Image (cartoon, rainbow, N blue to C red):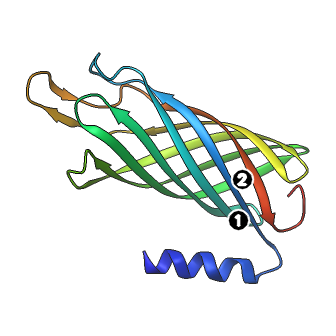
Amino acid sequence: MRSLVLLLVALPLSAQTTIDIGAAVGQQSYAASTDDSRVLTGADLLARRGNAGLHVAVEYADLTEEGALFVFHPDLVYRRPFGSFALMAGAGPTLMNVGGSGSGLTWNAELELERRFGRVGVFGRVRHYDYGLERDRAGESGPDGPAIYVGVRFQIAGAPGR
């Protein structure tokens, strides 16, 4: 965690680094009908230099039987601009805390399409990550497919529209 903080502090020191902050809302289906489908809300930070970067997303969902789900995705990404649009792909570890019972580790992959309006970007994202939830009565449950999001990001550092 300390390395991540140092990286985020060191990146803005470069004039070519672009930093965006934003929020997203999404939905993910679950294998158990009591959880199907849950709304995910989250905040994200995108720090990039050129086409490569680091995308950090923190998400929350309220699961019926387990309580609160908190998810942390620190992904390495590649972003390719096409005029006012950009396509971004990335992957990395996913850390979860379900109902206060500690954390789990899995991996995720994401694909995103963004439309830029100066320093503002509107995006649609698909992220796939898998984990299991042990249940007493219903057996095991977990995501039943990718999470789909829409969101907005604001560029706070770097040249406008990059």
- Asked if residue 131 shows in the view, the reply is no
Depth order, front residue of 56/66: 66
Q: Position of residue 52 (x, y in %)?
A: 68, 63
- Label 1: how many residues lie within 10 Å, few (<14), some (14-19) or many (20+)? many
- Label 2: how many residues lie within 10 Å, few (<14), some (14-19) or many (20+)? many
75 relative position to 123: left or right = left
Rendered residue at 66%/55% (across/down): 78
- The numbered disc on residue 105 is none
Q: Secondary structure at mark 2?
A: strand
Q: How many marks?
A: 2
Rendered residue at 61%/75% (across/down): 8
Disc on the earlier residue, 2 or 1: 1
Q: Amino acid at mark 1?
A: Arg
User: Is 151 above or below relative to 88?
Assistant: above
User: Is 105 above or below relative to 121?
Assistant: below
Q: Amino acid at mark 2?
A: Arg
Residues at marks 2 and 1, CA–CA distance in whole angstroms = 9 Å
Q: Position of residue 45 (x, y in %)?
A: 62, 59
**Mark 2 or 1: the one toward you:** 1
**Would you name the residue on which mark 1 appears?**
48
User: Is 71 above or below relative to 138?
Assistant: below
**Would you name the residue on which mark 2 appears?**
79
Q: Position of residue 140 (x, y in %)?
A: 17, 29
